[in-house]
Image (cartoon, rainbow, N blue to C red):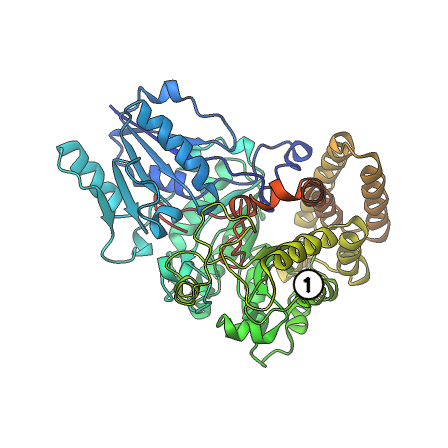
Amino acid sequence: MVKIAIINPAFEVSYWGLEHAQPMLGRRANMPVASLPLLAALTPPEYDVTLIDENVEPIDFDALADFDLVGVTGMSVQRFRMAEILQELKARDIFVALGGPWVTVEEEYFEDLADVIFIGEAETTWPQFLAEWQAGTHQYRYEQAERTDMSTVPTPRHDLLKNNHYMFGSLQFSRGCPFQCEFCDIIVTFGRKPRIKQPSQIIDELECLRREGLRIAFIVDDNLIGNKRGIKPVLQEVAKWQEDNGYPLAFSTEASLDLCEDEELMELMARCNIQSVFIGIETPNEESLKETKKFQNVREKGGTMLEKIHQIQDFGIEVWCGLIVGFDNDTTEIFEIQKTFLKESRIAHAMIGLLHAIPKTPLHARLQAEGRLDLDDDQAFGTNVIPKQMSRAELRDGYIETMQHAYQPDVYFDRLDRLFIEGGFRTRVFDTEHFRKRPLLRFRQATFYFAGFAVLFWRLMRHTPDRDLRKIYRRRILNVVRRRLSDPAIYFYYVIKCAMHYHHHKMTADIIEHPDTFVSTIGKSMRTNPAAKPVGVSMQLPVLAK
């Protein structure tokens, strides 16, 4: 039998990677990239497929010599490790297939380190290549002529992953986004017409995740509500599956800010047990939003951005967000503006990134024409963008100071408490009609969250090395338990947020202690396009791009 290994390289420490928090949570990585199990599902059954995620296990290069083919995928933030892996494989004369988001936008980056490359989606080109490779007639470059028909996508082979090492599972409902944000590569790769799977496909994948014992999963769509009319029937089926099976899974996802305009849609998401949503807020500077063509964030319908965020929070869906500094309309005042906005938004988790121009995006083309791109692959200022109204040093230093401020313990927990204690935030699913009518279901869910809280609290106290932080965490947690005693889901998630805070706090402490070393790797360890996908949660799809 032909043996194939597919590798996802290690990420460097990143905002969403939560590397510093993993020991507290008893895991090695936050979640698997979507490309590995999907590629395995696309591979004909006569092949023996092994999935290797370097984030949870080391690569045994000696063992790879026994494989007939090794596939490597990766994002822009993994490109340096990808190059190292490819060089090692080439030195061992191993046949290599290469794909993923980075090679999709930079085809020449790895020069002659791969025997075959895949551009974009690969639902048809991967099986095509395998047949041609077996026949000795394969090409060097594969790119689909048409975008994938999502109704043909098979159920990913989650069973081939080491799921016990991940905090969350991952799955996908749709691809594509209708908007036109200048910096985003999603619309370049997946287009502006959202394509949605059939409900039956999604239910099959939910059953697969359930069999693997996962309880929390991230829906990796770049904009779950890109086609509101089309996604509603899907969500209705997912909600029914949850209700019929006693709500075995809790979800997070990504969506656009106009979610607040559709209460029916929010209610369906709540019934599906989607408890939090990542939104590309980017900036409170409306001129910058218009500049980058993020018009959906400046529409008057629904009120101001803060009012829209509060509407979603008050409905019972927590908001996480991406913020960006370095737009052409940003001056050095943007850093204080972002701090104030973050405080008033009550958003605990905000990935603040430097504007970065990804190849093949409209932003990259525009800045290249203006001579405002740093073409060095290892940018000294953390981004390839040369800002317009401040120096590169001012942008870098302002970014570092903003990140440091955002994750100072008092600042972070004040935001969290404004939502969870003062705001009385309650996850909407527990107030749906289905839950209200089923006391036994409410009891089972409360038992799960209380038990999870006890375990995670013990791990947090044991694995937080900083004594002062342990005191802060203990005091804050006991306060939320006292104030929200009847809602164990709240203090379960509050403990997780303490662990996440430790990761972010440790990252920012490293920035301050080693600014030169760290800043030189900002572009490597953080995807600076948070709206497109946060690092560490970014789901690469079949040897392809995401």
Could you tell me if residue 215 is visible in this image? Answer: yes
Foreground of the two, 218 or 53: 53
- Vertically, is 281 above or below 167? below
Q: Is residue 232 left or right of residue 416?
A: left
Quick one: SS at disc 1? helix
Residue 524: x and y in percent read 51, 44
The amino acid pointed to by label 1 is Phe
Q: Quadrant of residue 339?
A: bottom right
Residue at the spot 81% in from the left edge and 57% down from the top edge: 421
In the rendered view, would you say 139 is above or below 297?
above
Rendered image quadrant of residue 27: top right
Residue 481 appears left or right of 218: right
Residue sitting at x 67%, y 62%:
316
Picture layout, residue 182 above or below residue 278: below
Give the residue at x 43% y 64%: 371
> Please, which residue is most extreme toward the bottom here?
300
Identify which residue, 79 or 11, lies in the foreground: 79
- Residue located beneath label 1 in the image: 335
Residue 308: % across, % down = 64, 72
